[in-house]
Amino acid sequence: MSVQVGDIIPEATLHYVPFDPNEDITACPRPIPYKLHEQLKGKKAIIFAIPGPFTPTCSETHVPGYLNAHEALKAKGVNEVICISVVDGFIMNAFAKAYKAGDKVIMAGDGSAEFSKALGLTQDLTKAGMGIRSKRFAIIVDDLVVKYVGVEEGPGVNASGVDAVLAKFNSLQLETQVFQSQPADYVFFHLFTGSLQVMAAGFFNLYVLSDGILLSTIYLLSQHFRDSPVWFMFGIRLKALYLPWAIIAQKFVMSGGEIPKASIAGLLSAHIYYYLTTIYPSQGGRRYLQTPEFLKQFFSNRPRNSQTNMFGRHAWGSGRRLDS
């Protein structure tokens, strides 16, 4: 069985070489142990895995994404970002130096696949001459408890990429800050904006369960945290208010001038929600959009338990050890 949200990550020892800015590219210092439970206790961390260093997707997309988003991840409270691969610590150190990881990402070897096997996230790449390797994945860990699992089922970087990880943090921020103690309102936001996007899909043939939902979440966050600094592509810093528009502009450019209709539909759906629930009522108008009572009864809006974890969510217990 593979790792699930709520599991405690298995105890395992990786091997890495601590960053030394004065180390020569040809130097071969001996890797040291990195004991996961010892190092990540009480911390918020991202562990992402690549099938192999110096391979195209890993080198051109996956790893650079996390390096460029270093400041954005720090702003979300991430203490450590760890890149692992089923190779030795020497190779991961060379990879770190070649791609100037510095102290932004710990490049660690899972040489015997001990950790990857315990997670249930290995793959057999013998036909490609690579043997047993880890799958391409990313997990968010909070005090050793898994909060997010993104595993790639095909080529490319999607669920395991930094954009998906940041989207998860955005969703958690909505849930625990904007909609704190209001689970029914949080569900209604997604139902309302999702319904508008489904209707738009009928007219424009859109895929509504991807970019649109992401943009609706980001737009609402940008309105509630307008002046908060965020980081975009390649470390560009801007106010949260401008982030949705920056994402749409990026998609427009990257697609060669194709209008990102799904993203625009998500943004507009969230704007309609925000206008009807916040802007118009604040100007003295009636609040026409209300969370239905049956949702409130079903989800029981109530104050949170005082026992919460670093994400602001309920700490029901110590979790279940994955490899026990």
Image (spheres, rainbow, N blue to C red):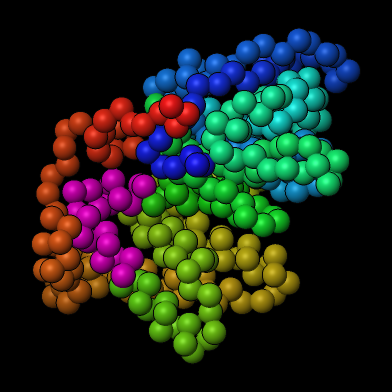
Residue sitting at 33 percent across and 31 percent down? 319
Position in image of residue 88 (x %, y %): 75, 22
In the displayed structure image, the side of residue 292 where residue 250 appears, left or right:
right
Residue sitting at 41 percent across and 42 percent down? 5
In the displayed structure image, the side of residue 239 where residue 134 appears, left or right:
right
User: Does 263 appear in magenta?
Assistant: no
Position in image of residue 84 (x %, y %): 65, 31
Residue sitting at 11 percent across and 68 percent down? 293
Region in magenta:
172-191
| Above-or-below relation of 215 to 129 | below
- Pick whichever, 276 or 168, lies toward us: 168
User: Does 179 appear in magenta?
Assistant: yes
Is residue 114 in view from this perspective?
yes
- Pick whichever, 111 or 287, lies toward us: 111
Residue 235, image quadrant: top right
In the displayed structure image, the side of residue 261 where residue 29 appears, left or right:
right
Residue sitting at 42 percent across and 77 percent down? 197
Residue 136, image quadrant: top right
Magenta: main secondary structure equals helix
Position in image of residue 141 (x %, y %): 45, 33
